Image (cartoon, grey):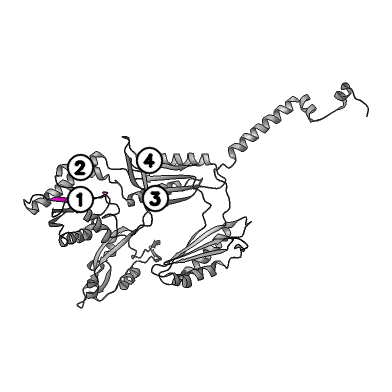
Amino acid sequence: MAHRDDKDIIANTHNTARYFTENRHVAWVLLFAVLIWGAFSWMNMPKRKDPDIPVLVAVAICQWPGADAEQVEQLVTKPMEQTIAQNSKLHEPGAGNDFALQSTSLAGYAIIQIQLSEGLADTTQEFNDINLRLKQLNDQLPQGAGPIQFNSGFGNTAARMITVASPKESDLELELRANNINKAIELARNDAGSESGRVSLVVALPTSVDTTALNSVIELLVINLIENGIATNIKEVIGPSFIGLDLSPLVGDQELLDYTFTFTKQKLGLNSFHIDGWDPILVRDIKDTKKKLKEVDGDKYSYRDLENITELITENFQTIEEVSIIQRSGTLSQVIYLDYSQDVFASYGITPAKIKSALNERNIIVPGGEVEVDGTEVIVYPSGAFNSVEEIANVVITETQDGTPVYLRDLGEIVRGYQSPPSLLNFYKWQDDKGNWHRSRAITLAIQMRDKDQIGKFGEALDQATQKLAPLLPSDIIIDKTSDQ
């Protein structure tokens, strides 16, 4: 091979490096184009902390309160397994711990774990198919069983968790509350006479809680205090946001408090008089009432208040483009209770089943159609749906021999309350300006980001929405980011 000198190489060799060296303007243009393209891609590419990994496992749960494990296995678990097995994309069991369906039957519960075949590009379609089949099965389950709960969201990760907690009452609010309690105590003690050594057992509650639900509890407590020789000459102490008793104790203060806690656990099956209530206090000298209230460190807002606040926050966050799913933890389902006596029911010849039937026949929502009046179409809304506790109380259940209607309110006490026992209680520990630690009831919002969105824009949108919501929320409500990606 002949040797080429440098002049020959320079004159006759053409390559990319030589081209860009001789045409520097083209190189600079392409360099800037690459930089701009990279910056644009970086700004618009999806950014998330956790990778999007398809999850092949889901769980179906069905409750049947009161049934034993064998009944659950035969009448609930097996029908659910047969229904789920109709899907053709279930995992084919092989060696090891692989499974398609794995079921557990417990007293009152049926739990089935489902696994799809590996390599599926879209698991959502198959999980939706299984969920739809299980919903159709609800109508074929035994009475009292269900509905079936299907959970396929194990791969969902909350990009931000926000905890909404109740603050403690301020010194001014405690002063006002103490004044109201003192007035009620003075009235009760004046009614009891000039008896010395009296003490008041008081339970404070958030201002939004209706104390009517505690009337029957107080009456039962009075009976137990007298029968067990704990106190005599008992007078009720009732007012806005508090309820209690003023009494002549036959035991010491600590023994009286211990008996009160024992009463709530054994007679009520609870840890307190009311799930929203503060710990009970004993007041001998009304000058110490505020101090006693300060010691129990009660929450200002009830679970119902927190639920209303978080519902407003959820509705506003749900309008954000980057937000997909919002789950709330710590909410308590509200229910209506009827406290009745079997003797009263027997005197009218009715059963609890008749109460249920009467309420179902009354609480209906049906279309009323439309009528034309002078050329204008008027929508007809039939009455029937319950909108308040009072409407439930006014339902006619039966009638006496002379034709007098017997309303539900005549058969017992109707009160609004929470699901008991609660399935989940959420609390939040926080530190005030003075460095003191507090524990408050709370509700946590787990907010998920939509796929292929940017975590930065997601956070900015939530922060802006929170600032806009601030004027609509209580100024002292505690809102904290307990997790933020």
Q: Residues within 10 Å of mark 2 (few under 14, many from 20)?
A: many
Q: Residues within 10 Å of mark 3 (few under 14, many from 20)?
A: some
Is label 2 or label 4 in front? 2
Return the residue nearer the eye: 111 or 328.
Answer: 111
- Residue 170 location, quadrant: top left
Q: Quadrant of the N terminus?
A: top right
Q: Are marks 2 and 4 in contact (CB under 8 Å)?
A: no
Residue 455 on the magenta span: no
Q: CA distance from mark 2 to mark 3?
A: 33 Å
Which mark is first along the chain, 4 or 2? 2
Taking the view exactly as shown, the residue that stands out farthest to the top is: 7
Q: How many marks?
A: 4
The spot of residue 41 in percent (x, y) is 62, 38
Which mark is first along the chain, 3 or 1? 1
Q: Which residue is mark 4?
A: 470
Q: Which residue is mark 1?
A: 254
The spot of residue 317 in percent (x, y) is 45, 46
Q: CA distance from mark 4 to mark 1?
A: 44 Å
Q: Which residue is mark 3?
A: 311
Q: CA distance from mark 4 to mark 3?
A: 14 Å
Residue 199 on the magenta span: yes
Q: Which residue is mark 2?
A: 290
The residue located at (90%, 25%) in the rendering is 4
Q: Are marks 1 and 3 in contact (CB under 8 Å)?
A: no
Which mark is first along the chain, 3 or 2? 2
Is label 4 or label 1 in front? 1
